[in-house]
């Protein structure tokens, strides 16, 4: 029986690729050094797949930045502003490639845009298409790497982003309205050439069309059949494995099953419910690849459960017509669990990273075909049972509290207009000024946190350092004349990790990195059990900060959905339930902050829209429980306590109803770069509460002038009643430097004064 994983993490066990690309960007490593490392990594990763016993190894899944960008480059989808770039020699290719991804600083050419890959935390580069785009082949890395694998003695299975998904994820950059689907057939002609060549090199070619599990544009649907007819013919002896993941096929089932492809890959973790219908409808000529091992988390597969599924497929189709696989590319899971030397042994015995997942796939296939792997099966089931029954996972107090949540717990005592009156004694001027929470995180701050973690300094030394930092940040804000102050978050390395470390039910890996975008990797906390808050987490810092000033000090928390979205979440409970548990824990913190005299509490939900399911029809249900979790977190406060939330992205159209339903008194959003355009949907919706549209782009070191910010505020004030407008930067200032922050905020406060006078 054929086995495989749809892709392997590319960064390397010790994030070697990250460091190598960053050295290349700095100029401290040459192109050939980077190319050499890449080659070593590919060989290492193929070897892992082969050692596990998998039938084929993925090729073309490696990337120097992002595989969607690679696909765009392969087909010559180079934006016009980069038309000077050369992709001829291996050296210029790398330099040019990184200019696309990161922009050309010298010439001031902005990078291509980046956005989230479906509902993962991986970001891809958005291909740009206009009427002038002329697709042409260049940089055939996928063919070279497939040849490279063959030469090294592996059986390659090239992985290619399919044309329908590629176009569905591209954006039109024409001045005039332009239908990017006009480029479909020119692109297909190029796909044919690539497939023709790959077809001579290998038996199976994996063509990824995850858009089939999401909302496929009408043009993609209309042309699907015809496109695949041509691709299949072009691939000759190469068999196409139409690969779908992240959800069930559902309404696109017939489209996929009648594509004529030799095989179909299904994500049977996130799309398990659809299996029966597929088994009934799958044509005799088609092989089914069963993605039973989750590629997106760190949990051990439950072999018994997977075998039940696999046996069902085997019963219907027979072994010859099936493959066993991971649900999706392992790009989204960390590399190797055996590196986790500090992880608690019990918790570790419940987990599985990419290397282990490769083995799981193979063991399952062996078990299915009756090969002797009983020892592995038993060890697996022992771990599964230990986790299922563990008292470390299940906390009766949390279950009891969950069961007893009353309807009231989700609603503030009164509606916003009444609360507004109760908050009048905050004495805020029109257009109150504030910041989003963090101030520049200097080396000294990072070193002190590190020294404390390593126990090189005492708790008292640590606290004194942080208090001095807070003192400095508070006095600078007073000098600047800001109206609502923050403590600056010097004690936090990361807005989720900081809370995870203090909540029960979380654990942390040492090396569980996954790629977020380019060279950036994140190490998500693991939520393994019921979540609760043993003791206050931020109260002392906030109390201290408030004691230094008569101005209101904002308490600063991370919301339940953001904590959920940026963690590896347990898979034995609905995400909505986990969110509720986190909400209850954070609610205790909100209460304690209020008791400590903190009048304004901001609960950041930076990731609200990231958690959105891949199908639009599921959005509403998600937003309902996400909003409920937010409200559960904060609805316990008095009318006189002002609740803020903050979101730093720009797509509010789809979620504006949910944003309003969150019922925060004030929301701050990112908007400076879009020139307040994204206020439009708040205006159309008649957003009823207060709003702080960012006027200072914190992603850039540039210092915005007073006039510029006044300009933005005038736009805002022309559409939103002035009594409901705040003045703030787009997001936290932690990545900025004080030299930029002071003049920028000086200008921001001056801009607020000016607009107040105009009002
Ligand atoms: N309060 C956080 C900060 O200022 C918010 C960060 C975010 O939204 N990403 O850093
Ligand atoms: Zn933000």
Image (cartoon, rainbow, N blue to C red):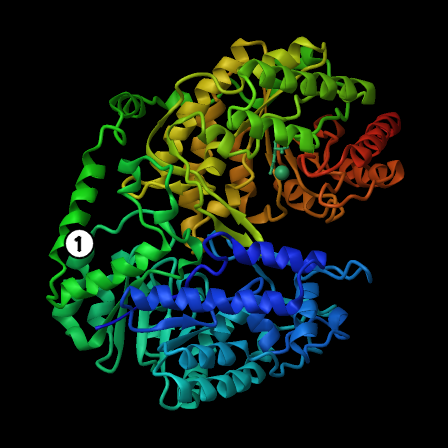
Instruction: Please say whether residue 666 is visible from this viewpoint.
Output: no
Nearest to the observer: residue 750 or residue 108: 108
Residue 134 location (% of width, % of height): 66, 81
Q: Residues within 10 Å of mark 1 (few under 14, many from 20)?
A: some
Residue 754 location (% of width, % of height): 88, 29
Residue 757 location (% of width, % of height): 88, 25
Q: Quadrant of residue 205?
A: bottom left
Nearest to the observer: residue 478 or residue 349: 349
Question: What's the residue at 21%, 81% (across, down)?
Answer: 284
Q: Quadrant of residue 431?
A: top right
Q: Is residue 662 above or below residue 423?
A: below
- Ligand 1 is found in the corner quadrant, namely top right
Q: Is residue 203 above or below residue 217?
A: below
* Left or right side of 642 for 248: left
In which quadrant of the rendered image does the C terminus lie? top right
Question: What residue does disc 1 label?
Answer: 376
Question: What's the residue at 66%, 21% (across, down)?
Answer: 487
Residue 573 location (% of width, % of height): 29, 39
In which quadrant of the rendered image does the N terminus lie? bottom left
Q: Is residue 77 above or below residue 430?
A: below
């Amino acid at each position: 029986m054929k086995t495989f994983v749809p892709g392997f993490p590319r960064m390397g066990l010790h994030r070697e690729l990250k460091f190598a690309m960053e050295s290349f960007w700095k100029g401290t490593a040459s192109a050939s050094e980077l190319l050499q490392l890449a080659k070593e990594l590919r060989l290492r990763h193929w070897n892992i797949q082969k050692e596990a016993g998998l039938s084929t190894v993925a090729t073309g899944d490696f990337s120097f930045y992002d595989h969607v960008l690679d696909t765009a480059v392969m087909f010559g989808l180079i934006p016009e502003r980069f038309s000077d770039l050369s992709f001829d020699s291996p050296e210029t290719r790398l330099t040019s490639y990184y200019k696309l991804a990161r922009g050309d600083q010298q010439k001031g050419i902005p990078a291509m845009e980046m956005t989230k890959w479906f509902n993962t935390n991986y970001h891809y580069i958005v291909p740009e298409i206009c009427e002038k785009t002329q697709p042409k082949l260049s940089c055939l890395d996928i063919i070279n790497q497939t040849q490279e694998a063959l030469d090294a003695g592996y059986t390659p299975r090239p992985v290619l982003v399919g044309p329908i998904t590629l176009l569905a994820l591209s954006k039109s950059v024409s001045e005039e309205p332009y239908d990017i689907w006009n480029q479909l057939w020119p692109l297909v002609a190029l796909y044919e050439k690539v497939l023709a060549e790959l077809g001579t090199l290998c038996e199976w070619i994996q063509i990824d069309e995850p858009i089939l599990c999401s909302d496929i544009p009408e043009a993609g649907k209309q042309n699907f059949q015809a496109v695949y007819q041509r691709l299949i013919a072009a691939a000759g002896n190469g068999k196409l494995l139409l690969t779908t993941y992240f959800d069930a096929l559902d309404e696109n089932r017939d489209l996929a099953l009648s594509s004529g492809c030799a095989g179909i890959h299904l994500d049977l973790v996130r799309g398990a419910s659809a299996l029966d219908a597929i088994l009934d409808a799958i044509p005799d000529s088609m092989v089914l690849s069963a993605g039973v091992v989750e590629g997106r988390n760190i949990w051990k597969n439950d072999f018994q459960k997977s075998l039940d599924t696999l046996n069902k497929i085997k019963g219907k189709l027979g072994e010859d017509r099936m493959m066993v696989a991971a649900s999706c590319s392992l790009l989204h899971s960390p590399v190797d669990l055996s590196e986790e030397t500090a992880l608690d042994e019990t918790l570790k015995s419940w987990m599985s990273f990419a290397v282990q997942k490769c083995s799981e796939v193979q063991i399952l296939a062996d078990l299915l075909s009756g090969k002797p792997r009983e020892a592995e099966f038993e060890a697996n089931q022992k771990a599964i049972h230990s986790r299922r029954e563990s008292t470390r996972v299940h906390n009766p107090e949390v279950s009891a509290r969950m069961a007893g949540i009353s309807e009231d717990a989700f609603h503030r005592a009164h509606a916003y207009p009444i609360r507004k009156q109760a908050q009048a004694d905050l004495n805020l001027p029109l257009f109150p000024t504030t910041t989003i929470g963090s101030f520049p995180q200097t080396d000294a701050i990072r070193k002190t946190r590190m020294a404390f973690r390593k126990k090189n300094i005492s708790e008292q030394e640590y606290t004194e350092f942080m208090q001095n930092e807070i003192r400095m940040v508070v006095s600078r804000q007073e000098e600047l004349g800001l109206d609502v102050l923050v403590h600056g978050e010097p004690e936090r390395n990361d807005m989720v990790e900081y809370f995870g470390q203090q909540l029960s039910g979380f654990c942390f890996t040492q090396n569980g990195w996954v790629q977020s975008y380019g060279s950036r990797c994140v190490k998500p906390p693991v939520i393994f059990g019921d979540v609760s808050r043993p003791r206050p987490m931020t109260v002392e810092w906030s109390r201290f900060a408030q004691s230094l000033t008569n101005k209101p000090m904002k308490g600063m928390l991370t919301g339940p959905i953001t904590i959920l979205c940026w963690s590896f979440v347990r898979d034995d409970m609905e995400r909505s339930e986990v969110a509720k548990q986190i909400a209850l824990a954070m609610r205790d913190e909100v209460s304690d902050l209020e008791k400590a005299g903190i009048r304004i509490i901001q609960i950041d939900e930076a990731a609200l829209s990231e958690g959105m399911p891949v199908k639009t029809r599921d959005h509403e249900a998600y937003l309902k429980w996400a909003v409920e979790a937010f409200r559960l977190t904060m609805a316990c406060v008095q009318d006189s306590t002002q609740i803020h939330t903050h979101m730093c992205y720009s797509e509010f159209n789809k979620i504006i109803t949910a944003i309003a339903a969150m019922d925060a008194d004030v929301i701050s959003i990112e908007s400076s770069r879009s020139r307040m355009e994204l206020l439009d949907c708040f205006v159309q919706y008649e957003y009823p509460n207060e709003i702080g549209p960012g006027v200072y782009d914190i992603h850039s070191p540039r210092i915005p002038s007073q006039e510029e910010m006044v300009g933005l505020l005038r736009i805002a004030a022309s559409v939103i009643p002035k009594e409901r407008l705040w003045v703030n930067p787009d997001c936290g200032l932690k990545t900025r430097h004080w030299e930029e922050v002071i003049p920028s905020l000086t200008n921001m406060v001056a801009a607020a004064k000016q607009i107040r006078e105009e009002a």
